[in-house]
Amino acid sequence: MIRENLQVVQKNIKAACARSGRSETSVKLIAVSKTKPVAMLWEAYEAGCRDFGENKVQELIEKYEQMPKDIRWHMIGHLQRNKVKYIVDKVWLIHSVDSLRLAEEISKEAVRKNVKVSILVEVNVAGEESKFGVTTQDAVSLVEEIAKLPNIVIKGLMTIAPYVENSEENRLYFAKLMQIYVDIIHKNIDNVFMEELSMGMTGDYEVAIEEGATYVRVGTGIFGERQYLNV
Ligand SMILES: *Cc1c(COP(=O)(O)O)cnc(C)c1O
């Protein structure tokens, strides 16, 4: 089941790349495995997945310990400052940095553990009140401030688009994130390497690719619907 789902997603990624004149290798698929048991992660691993996304620190660490060490773990959920210390040396990329205070904590722990931590700045492009992320107006100045911190490397931007029935409705938000990304590139800020745009989920990753995504984060499309117990 997971293997077949992955094949479908990969085929769709390939088609979206072809439609937009992009090379297939310019888009990386993150298998968002939050709430799913390790057995399912193994299935995805055996089908070739090496990038996994989690949104809770505790769950990420538990899975990190049980899974092979060649996996690239992506922290995609809201991160509390008091939990930063548990993951700085375990994650490949933190997608959800949206404040200077959080970035300072990441930097401090990275210095202490003598590692460099790659991050994306999360932007709330649609201005949804329920979502985390810096506003579009403050994104560039936040990048400039974070860039001054030691042992933290800004690799790009991330957004979580609104939940919509028709993925076309999110196209303008993906285009907006791309525009901010290009603005930042033109500023040539030291210690900022704009290489990644993390945007697009199960419902809208094809549109996100057409608008320039380099990382798409797909959960349901690979692992099936999530069941949240005890809520
Ligand atoms: C859960 C989640 C996803 C994956 O969502 P699906 O709709 O299941 O693909 C992607 N990004 C973030 C930040 C998430 O929390």
Image: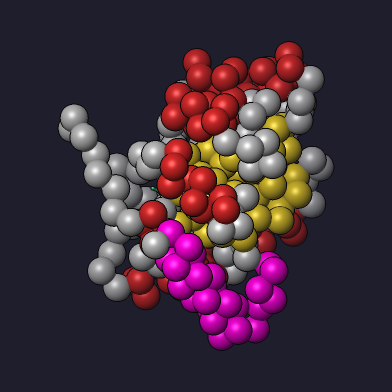
Indicate the quadrant containing the N terminus: top left, top right, bottom left or bottom right: bottom left
x 33%, y 56%: residue: 224
Examine the structure image and report whether residue 21 is included in the region drawn in magenta.
yes
Examine the structure image and report whether residue 176 is included in the region drawn in magenta.
no
Indicate the quadrant containing the C terminus: top left, top right, bottom left or bottom right: top left
Give the prevailing secondary structure in the magenta stretch: helix
Q: Can residue 173 be seen in this view?
A: no
On screen, residue 154 versus residue 73, left or right, reads right
Q: Quadrant location of residue 115?
A: top right
x 44%, y 29%: residue: 59
Q: Which region is colored magenta?
A: 2-26
> Who is closer to the viewer here, 114 or 33?
33
Q: Quadrant location of residue 227?
A: top left
On screen, residue 230 versus residue 125, left or right, reads left
x 54%, y 81%: residue: 15
Q: In this view, does 51 lie above or below 228?
A: below
x 59%, y 40%: residue: 73
Q: In this view, does 133 lie above or below 106?
A: below
Residue 175: x %, y % from top left: 51, 68
Coloured how? secondary structure
Q: Is residue 156 visible?
A: yes
Q: How many labels does the image show?
A: 0
Residue 162: x %, y % from top left: 33, 57
Residue 135: x %, y % from top left: 46, 46
On screen, residue 201 versus residue 192, left or right, reads left
Residue 205: x %, y % from top left: 46, 66
Q: Is residue 84 above or below residue 160?
A: above
